[in-house]
Image (cartoon, grey):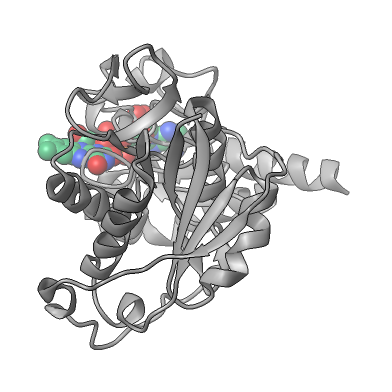
């Protein structure tokens, strides 16, 4: 069976959920071979093996932490040469997409970004994408070289699939460019305790209807009752009510949670572009004609200042 390289996104050995989702998709098209780099790479092995990795290629070096993406591209290129895989899968984070694009260029391959599904095809893996501001769903495959595919978080379930997880040390020679751009400092973001927006299973968003930065506490309270991330429309971000890192949409982040709750958001095409692939969409809007109602699974026509606090209380009460 063909091997499929999966780039491992981890923090000091703790594997991030999008990588486990990639393993689920990789098993559909071949045998997953994970590539874990940097500090704690060896600590990822048990988790990766539990989720289907037949092999884990590891390499620890200071370069991965100290420099930007090129050392990781060098390592993936080395893994590509060692394995000759049927595809390379990378999670669609900002860093993941840069790594994937550089790798595809290096190995002379085509690339598909932001896939939301992946299946085996007669002529190679077939990726599903949501394109043109989510106006169309396309299926495509790479016809040149080894397909390099980035997949949006929450596109697949995390599945337990125990596999051998044989560990092999990857031999990597860093290129001259690898140390060209150095990370000179890091300022960790203040933790809100909420999940990362693009990876969250539930996202609760607020728009212009929230009518002020101070009122976002209503949105945050609902999010916290559900263990959700908080999103915002561009109108809310441009008004300075919520940080740009939380913006959902064409010029913000693209999310695909199990549940997306839009509060006081009209549903402009640029907002839809970032959330339309959510599995279940709920909207609260006082205008029954708001375009957001065209795409919802459940809609509440009402004032968010009445509806959202009641919803939060009800959820808290049911949780006990
Ligand atoms: P509005 O369109 O003003 O809608 C507010 C809604 O709140 C209305 O439907 C109203 O009925 C409802 N409302 C008001 N008060 C209440 C209440 N008390 N209770 C319940 N409902 C209430 N937008 C994004 O979101 N993300 C992007 O990434 C993005 N990128 C863009 C890129 C470009 C190039 C351009 C041109 C635009 C982009 N936009 C983006 C902006 C987009 O076109 C819309 O202007 C924006 O999404 C509107 O935000 P909104 O829905 O919060 O505000």
Q: Which of 116 and 201 is in front in this view?
A: 116
Q: Nearer the viewer, residue 267 or 27?
A: 27
Q: Position of residue 289 (x, y in %)?
A: 36, 14
Give the residue displayed 17% in from the left and 46% down from the top. 107
Q: Is residue 314 above or below residue 198?
A: above
Q: In this view, does 117 lie above or below 94?
A: above
Give the residue displayed 59% in from the left and 64% down from the top. 44
Q: Which of 236 and 277 is in front in this view?
A: 277
Quadrant of the rendered structure where residue 61 is?
bottom left
Give the residue displayed 48% in from the left and 19% down from the top. 296
Q: Position of residue 245 (x, y in %)?
A: 33, 59
Assign ligand 1 to one image quadrant.
top left
Left/right of residue 58 with respect to residue 109 in the rendered view: right
Quadrant of the rendered structure where residue 270 is?
top left
Left/right of residue 178 with respect to residue 50 in the rendered view: left
Q: Can residue 288 be seen in this view?
A: no
Give the residue displayed 44% in from the left and 39% down from the top. 4
Left/right of residue 104 with respect to residue 217 in the rendered view: left
Q: Can residue 304 be seen in this view?
A: yes
Q: Is residue 270 above or below residue 33?
A: above
- Residue that sits furthest to the bottom in the current view: 184
Q: Nearer the viewer, residue 12 or 303?
A: 12
């Amino acid at each position: 069976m063909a091997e499929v390289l999966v780039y491992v996104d981890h923090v000091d050995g703790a594997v991030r959920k999008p990588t486990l989702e990639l393993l689920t998709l990789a098993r559909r098209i071949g045998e997953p071979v994970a590539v874990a780099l940097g500090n704690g790479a060896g600590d990822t092995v048990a988790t990766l093996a539990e989720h289907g990795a037949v092999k884990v290629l590891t390499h620890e070096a200071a370069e991965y932490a100290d420099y930007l993406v090129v050392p990781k591209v060098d390592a993936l290129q080395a893994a590509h040469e060692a394995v000759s895989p049927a595809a390379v899968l990378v999670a669609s984070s900002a860093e993941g997409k840069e790594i994937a694009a550089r790798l595809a260029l290096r190995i002379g391959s085509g690339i598909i970004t932001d896939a939301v599904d992946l299946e085996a095809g007669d002529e190679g893996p077939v990726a599903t994408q949501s394109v043109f501001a989510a106006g169309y769903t396309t299926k495509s495959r790479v016809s040149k070289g080894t397909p390099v595919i980035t997949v949006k978080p929450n596109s697949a379930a995390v599945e337990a699939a125990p596999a051998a997880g044989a560990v092999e040390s990857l031999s990597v020679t860093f290129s001259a460019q690898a140390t060209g751009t150095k990370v000179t400092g890091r300022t960790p973001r203040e933790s809100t305790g909420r999940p990362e927006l693009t990876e969250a299973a539930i996202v609760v968003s607020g728009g212009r209807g929230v009518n002020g930065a101070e009122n976002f506490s209503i949105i945050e309270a609902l999010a916290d009752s559900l263990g959700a991330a908080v999103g915002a429309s561009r109108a809310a971000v441009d008004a300075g009510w919520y940080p740009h890192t939380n913006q959902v949409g064409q010029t913000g982040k693209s999310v695909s949670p199990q549940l997306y709750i839009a509060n006081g958001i009209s549903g402009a095409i640029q907002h839809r572009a970032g959330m339309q692939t959510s599995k279940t969409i709920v909207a609260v809007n006082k205008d029954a004609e708001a375009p957001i109602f065209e795409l919802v699974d459940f809609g509440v026509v009402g004032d968010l200042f009445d509806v959202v606090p009641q919803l939060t209380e009800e959820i808290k009460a049911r949780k006990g």
